[in-house]
Amino acid sequence: MTSDTKTKQLLKLLIAAAWIDGTIQPEERDYLNQMIATNALGDDSEIKMYLSEATPIDPQQCYQWLEEYLGQNPSKEDYQNLLESLSALIYVDDNVETEEAKLLTYLQNLEPGSQSQKSLFDNLFKGIQELYRKAM
């Protein structure tokens, strides 16, 4: 897969993640527009369609795109890039919704080598899980 294709796939996934709680927050929209501009995808018709908010993206589609982005044997670099981008999007509005916390937890379970080594982000995920449990 080419770098441009991977970048577009990541942006589609981020747009879907912004929808996961049912609405794209203004801060999330600003972050997405910045990412789109940085990667020169502002004229891409597919990206425009997903960002238009005309039709919400189903949470299941988000999980499917996440798995497609990482593939069967994700590299540490792809995983790290996804984790950093997704975390930045989720935290940009200073509010972590339940569905967003579930998505991050799901992503943690897909970490390459997670069975044998501790992630630098374990503390972050534990904090999110605690917030989620308190919210329930």
Image (cartoon, grey):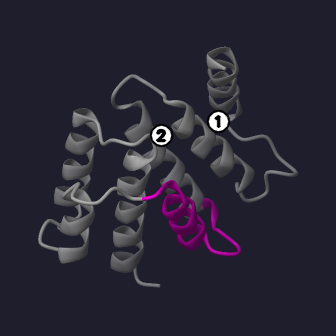
* Residue type at tag 2: Ser
- What numbered label is drawn on residue 93? none
Residue 100 vertical placement versus 129 (above, below): below
Residue 113 is drawn in which quadrant?
bottom right
Residue receiving disc 1: 121
Whether tag 1 and tag 2 are in contact, CB under 8 A, the answer is yes
Does the magenta-highlighted stretch encompass residue 46? Answer: no
Residue under the point 45% across and 46% down: 20
Is 75 positioned to the left or the right of 28 in the image? right
Picture quarter with the C terminus: top right
Among the 4 quarters of the image, the one containing residue 71: bottom right
* 1 or 2: mark nearer the eye: 2
Q: Residue furthest right?
A: 116
Q: Which mark is residue 87?
A: 2
Residue 7 locus on image (x, y percent): 36, 69
Residue at the image point whose x is 55% and y is 60% from the top: 60
Q: Nearer the viewer, residue 76 or 8?
A: 8
Q: Residues within 10 Å of mark 2 (few under 14, many from 20)?
A: some
13 on left or right of 103: left
Question: Gap in Å between the C-alphas at discs 1 and 2?
Answer: 10 Å
In magenta, the rendered stretch is 58-76
Rendered location of residue 59, percent (x, y): 50, 54
Residue 87 in the image, given as x and y percentages of width and height: 47, 40
Q: Secondary structure at mark 2?
A: helix
Decide if residue 22 is on the left or right side of residue 30.
right
- Mark 1, secondary structure of its residue: loop
Residue at image position (28%, 36%) is 25
Q: Residues within 10 Å of mark 1 (few under 14, many from 20)?
A: few
Q: Is residue 91 above or below residue 14?
A: above
64 on left or right of 19: right
